[in-house]
Image (spheres, rainbow, N blue to C red):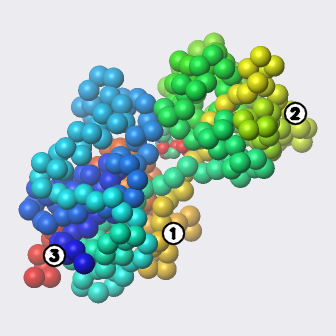
Amino acid sequence: MRAYDVVIIGAGPAGLAAGLYAGRARLNTLIVEREKDGGQIVITNEIENYPGCVEEETGPSLIERMVKQTRDFGVEKVLDTIVDVSLDGDIKILKGQHDTYSAKAVIIAAGAHPVPIGCKGEREFSGKGVSYCATCDAAFFEDFEVYVVGGGDSAVEEALYLTKFARKVTIIHRRDELRAAKSIQEKAFANDKIAFLWDCVVEEISGDGLVESMTVKNTKTGQTTEIRADEEDGTFGIFVFIGFQPNSALFKGKVAMNERGYIVTDPDMKTNIPGVFAAGDIREKSLRQVVTAAADGAIAAVQAGKYIEAQE
Ligand code: NAP
């Protein structure tokens, strides 16, 4: 078992900021990440709202610098998936697939993941025309048609990004009004590559190997329409951006959560369990952005330091 002062679960902006502050406070700190560093931000092509970000900042470029900062402060990082946690005692135990870790304080910064549509064929065609990441998959649809499902900031921003590749981008939204910020909406309405399919939900996705057609249903009239790929193209893309769910299943029954599974904290990022803090998108909060995740991480690390000091 490897013993630390602080173990941080997740290497997104919240976990990396927590690592930076914990490392700077000379706490013996480990960040455990199950996939790629950066969390959802690495699937974001353009960052223009993180204070001080450089021109043409991308998710990966910002994360790369954050990772370097934590490394420079001596924070360890490991690729492992935590499968069980015991958080009640003074020493917290985190069991990973590869190793077991102990910590005096734990910061949960495991983030959130995209919500699937839940329609027939979605899972089958995931990676075969259905995508949850425009940055990752837009290039596959150079000069093809794509559909974007959703009406929030993500859907509309990613639709704008997709216009750089696809010849036409149609936003399918379940209402007749976008949820996205007005400034983002204005850009979409002014872009002549973007069309809208209002009051519609996707009911079924089908094809032979690749997506070839989808059935959409009008939420007001109940009428269903089949959208088929252009004959020459043979396929089209479906990019899904209909919100997120917290990656909190592991902590269910162990840390207090709201009804949607977001971990409840006080303003100091303290959960209901002493020595356990939560930061970033996994936490119940009103604004989930890189800047708020980073701020949460900083607060959580400082409070974890104070908690450890008080225990000694
Ligand atoms: P969101 O704001 O929750 O929007 C989700 C969209 O998907 C809504 O338009 C919603 O429709 C629709 N939707 C939800 N469930 C659906 C379903 N089952 N079928 C069809 N449509 C469905 O999610 P988001 O756009 O991913 O953004 C998440 C958070 O990140 C937000 O706080 C957002 O402001 C923030 N964000 C900010 C930026 C930025 O500032 N640059 C960029 C990306 C994200 P309704 O509108 O009808 O509910």
Q: Which mark is residue 298?
A: none
Between 7 and 2, the residue placed more toward the observer is 2
Q: Quadrant of the N terminus?
A: bottom left
User: Number of numbered discs present?
Assistant: 3
Residue 86 as seen in the image, left or right of residue 204: left
Depicted 59 relative to depicted 31: above or below: above
Kindly identify the residue that appears in the image at 83 percent across and 38 percent down. 215
Seen in the image, is 216 located left or right of residue 236?
Answer: right
Q: Establish if 309 lies above or below 285.
A: below
Cα–Cα span, label 2 and label 3: 60 Å
Say which quarter of the image contains residue 268. Answer: bottom left
Q: Which residue is mark 2?
A: 225
Please, what is the three-letter code of the amino acid marked with disc 3? Ile
- N-term mark: 3 or 1: 1
Residue closer to the observer: 107 or 29: 29
Label 2, ligand 1: CB separation under 8 Å: no
Query: In percent of the image, x 35 and y 46: which residue is there?
Result: 38
Image quadrant where residue 140 sits: top right
For residue 249, which numbered disc appears in the image?
A: 1
Residue 242 drawn at (x, y percent): 61, 44
Name the residue located 31 percent from the left edge and 79 percent from the top edge.
Answer: 93
Counting residues from the N terminus, which is met first, the one under dot 2 or under dot 3?
Answer: 2
**Residue 269 visible (yes or no):** no
Q: Which is more toward the observer, 256 or 114?
A: 114
The amino acid pointed to by label 1 is Ala
Q: Which residue is mark 3?
A: 308
**Which residue is most to the bottom?**
89
